[in-house]
Image (cartoon, grey):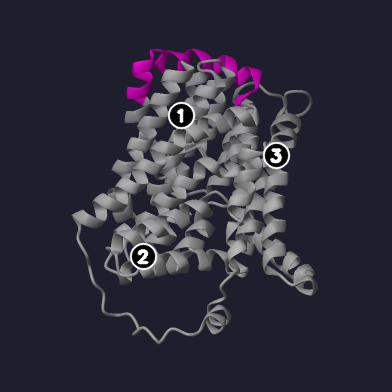
């Protein structure tokens, strides 16, 4: 029966890759089929209706709330001008020095990446940052990749990601945080190397299609025209991180602290109610796709954790899983491309189910599975041509997502290798 379940998983991957079914729908259908194959009854304890669907759907509720709050904070960064001001200040500081401008946009992208992910993060940093980089001569592919690499630098400190791994793998948040801190230096070094190497290797590419620069307005007019946020509001992206990482505050209160700080530092009291509601509703729109996906992932995790599924899959998975630390690093480094194109190791797809199998069957410690999936997530978030942030950044820069994948993949592959090496050295 284990072989049949693996074949069903392969069919699910094929359905997602061929776009026959949306990822969330495919994962739910896959979960129901796996549950029946594992011998689960229709209703009652350990059943399809009561355990897989009823209990699985809200299993990642804490993650969904964190995603919503992160999206809400992202909308506040957009509406209040905080994100735009950060990018403009960096561009002004860099002047006409392409590498300095790119490094500045990289830094802002990293800050935004700690708050929210996916396309909203790319938009917050890229709407101004990508045209600014192209204007000073950064090649278009490099400009798009710089925003994505910057977001990846912030992902190890993205609080909703901490919550997801904590809930999905049943690990304390402190454990997740500990590994993410170890992963961060690899992401940072790779991102800086990308900017320095790619901008110098490809040289400066001037574009003459931009409008001429107008005379600089006064500071007051400039704030009114461009929507500059006050300097103290620019600290907003650091507030949730300081609360969670520095003061050990729980994730949801930390995100709420960021929302309140952004509101208080940018909004007049009589306008607060309207802005709160407007940005919250906007946050719901942004958060709807990932929340739908997390409902499906929770259902899939419930299915693969059924006793029948564990008994069927354990011998097969154990037979093909490397136990030696060196082989663990080598094999899973070679398998990095399988997290691209919504592949079987994409943690926000079938990869979540595979991670659940590895934990439930006891093949690897949960913290080792965390290291593997978090390392793969660094690759998916930057180089996957089907991820929303990659598609948006590439199209906005005027290049194809596949061009961005080719340029960025060697760098994030190295990040994944570093994360897997730390995992093997620390947890195996």
- Pointer 3: what residue? 249
**Circle number at residue 298:** none
- Prevalent SS, magenta region: helix
As drawn, is 135 to the left or to the right of 267? left
Question: Disc 1 or 2, which lies upstream in sequence?
Answer: 2
Question: For residue 310: magenta?
Answer: yes
Q: Which residues are magenta?
A: 304-331
Query: For the point 63% across and 24% down, which residue is it?
Result: 305
In which image quadrant can residue 376 be found? Answer: top left
Image marks 1 and 2: residues in contact by CB distance under 8 Å: no
Question: Residue 96 at what x, y percent from top left?
Answer: 30, 70
As drawn, is 343 to the left or to the right of 49? left
Question: Residue 8 at what x, y percent from top left?
Answer: 50, 31
Q: Secondary structure at mark 1?
A: helix
Q: Nearer the viewer, mark 2 or mark 3?
A: 2
Question: Disc 1 or 3, which lies upstream in sequence?
Answer: 3
| Location of residue 39 with respect to 167 vertically, above or below | above
Question: Residue 302 at what x, y percent from top left?
Answer: 65, 29
Question: For residue 276: magenta?
Answer: no
Q: Nearer the viewer, mark 1 or mark 3?
A: 3
- Pointer 1: what residue? 372
| Location of residue 37 with respect to 132 vertically, above or below | above
Q: CA distance from mark 1 to mark 2?
A: 37 Å
Query: For the point 62% across and 62% down, which residue is it?
Result: 233
Q: CA distance from mark 2 to mark 3?
A: 35 Å
- Pointer 2: what residue? 94
Question: Disc 2 or 3, which lies upstream in sequence?
Answer: 2
Q: Secondary structure at mark 3?
A: loop
Q: Residues within 10 Å of mark 2 (few under 14, many from 20)?
A: some
Query: For the point 57% across and 31% down, which residue is it?
Result: 176
| Residue 281 seen | no
In which image quadrant can residue 93 be found? Answer: bottom left
């Amino acid at each position: 029966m284990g072989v049949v379940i693996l074949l069903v998983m392969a069919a699910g991957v094929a359905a997602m890759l061929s776009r026959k079914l949306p990822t969330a729908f495919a994962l739910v259908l896959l979960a129901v089929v796996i549950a029946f194959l594992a011998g689960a009854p229709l209703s009652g304890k350990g059943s399809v209706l009561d355990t897989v669907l009823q209990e699985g759907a809200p299993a990642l509720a804490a993650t969904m709330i964190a995603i919503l709050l992160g999206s809400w904070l992202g909308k506040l960064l957009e509406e209040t001008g905080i994100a735009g001001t950060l990018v403009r200040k960096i561009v002004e500081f860099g002047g006409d020095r392409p590498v300095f401008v790119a490094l500045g946009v990289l830094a802002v992208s990293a800050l935004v990446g700690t708050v929210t992910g996916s396309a909203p993060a790319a938009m917050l940093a890229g709407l101004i940052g990508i045209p600014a980089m192209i204007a000073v001569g950064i090649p278009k592919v490099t400009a798009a990749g710089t925003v994505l690499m910057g977001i990846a630098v912030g992902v190890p400190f993205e609080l909703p990601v901490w919550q997801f791994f904590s809930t999905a793998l049943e690990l304390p948040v402190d454990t997740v945080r500990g590994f993410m801190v170890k992963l961060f230096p690899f992401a940072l070094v790779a991102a800086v190397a990308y900017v320095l190497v790619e901008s110098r290797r490809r040289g400066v590419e001037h574009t003459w299609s931009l409008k001429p620069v107008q005379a600089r307005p006064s500071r007051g007019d400039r704030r009114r025209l461009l929507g500059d946020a006050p300097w103290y509001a620019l600290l907003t992206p650091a507030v949730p991180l300081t609360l969670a990482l520095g003061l050990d505050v729980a994730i949801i209160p930390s995100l709420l602290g960021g929302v309140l700080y952004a509101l208080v530092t940018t909004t007049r009291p009589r306008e607060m109610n309207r802005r709160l509601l407007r940005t919250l509703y906007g946050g719901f729109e942004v958060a709807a796709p990932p929340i739908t996906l997390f409902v499906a992932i929770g259902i899939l995790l419930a299915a693969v954790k059924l006793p029948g599924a564990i008994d069927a899959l354990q011998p097969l998975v154990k037979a093909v899983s490397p136990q030696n630390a060196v082989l663990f690093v080598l094999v899973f480094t070679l398998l990095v491309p399988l997290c691209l194109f919504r592949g079987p190791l994409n943690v926000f797809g079938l990869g979540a189910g595979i991670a659940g199998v590895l934990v439930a069957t006891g093949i690897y410690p949960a913290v080792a599975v965390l290291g593997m999936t978090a390392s793969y997530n660094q690759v998916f978030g930057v180089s996957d041509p089907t991820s929303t942030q990659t598609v948006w950044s590439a199209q906005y820069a005027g290049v194809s997502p596949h061009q961005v994948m080719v340029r960025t993949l060697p760098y994030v592959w190295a990040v994944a290798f570093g994360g897997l090496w730390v995992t093997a050295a620390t947890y195996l």
